[in-house]
Image (spheres, grey):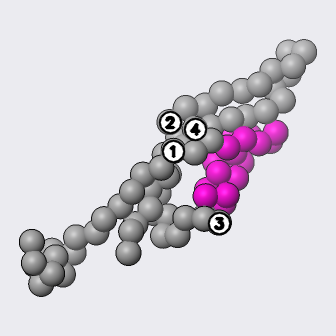
Amino acid sequence: MTPAMAKKSNVSVAKVIEISAQSPVSFEDAVRNGVKAASKSVKNIRSAWVKDQQVEVENGNVTMFRVALKVTFELK
């Protein structure tokens, strides 16, 4: 594909990385923490989806929410 063809077809190149994050508050907060941490070293983040969720339990109480995220970012 020539550069002129790529411009006309609006082709973009993206990469997906997997990260883990946690929060003592909620799964939603763990996702926010993960995206915020990833954005410190990865630019152009476009989306993230939760691959897995897990909780840590102590004495019958949930003490930590953990998520495994797939984060998609666009390469320039």
Give the labeled residue for mark 2. 51
Position of residue 15 in the picture relative to residue 19 (left or right):
left
Give amino acid for label 1.
Glu
**Which one is in front in this view, the residue at disc 1 or the one at disc 4?**
1
Give the labeled residue for mark 1. 18
Q: Quadrant of residue 1?
A: bottom left
Q: Of marks 1 and 2, which one's residue comes earlier in the chain?
A: 1
Q: What residue do we see at 42% from left, 51% from top?
A: 16
Q: What residue do we see at 62% from left, 41% from top?
A: 20
**Which one is in front in this view, the residue at disc 1 or the one at disc 2?**
1
Q: Of marks 2 and 3, which one's residue comes earlier in the chain?
A: 3
In this picture, is 34 found above or below 36?
above
Majority secondary structure of magenta residues: helix
Q: Of marks 2 and 4, which one's residue comes earlier in the chain?
A: 2
Is residue 32 located in the magenta-colored stretch of the structure?
Answer: yes
Quadrant of the image for the C terminus?
A: bottom left
In this picture, is 15 found above or below 75?
above
Residue 47 at least partly seen: yes
Residues at marks 1 and 2 touching, judged by CB atoms closer than 8 Å = yes
Circle 3 residues within 10 Å: few <14, some 14–19, many ≥20: few
**SS at badge 3:** loop
Between the residue at mark 1 and the residue at mark 4, the CA separation in whole angstroms equals: 7 Å
Q: Position of residue 31 (x, y in %)?
A: 64, 48
Q: Position of residue 12 (x, y in %)?
A: 28, 69
**SS at badge 4:** strand
Is residue 63 located in the magenta-colored stretch of the structure?
Answer: no
Q: Magenta residues, as a range?
A: 21-38
Give the labeled residue for mark 4. 68
Between the residue at mark 2 and the residue at mark 4, the CA separation in whole angstroms equals: 5 Å
Give amino acid for label 2.
Lys
Residue 40 circle label = 3
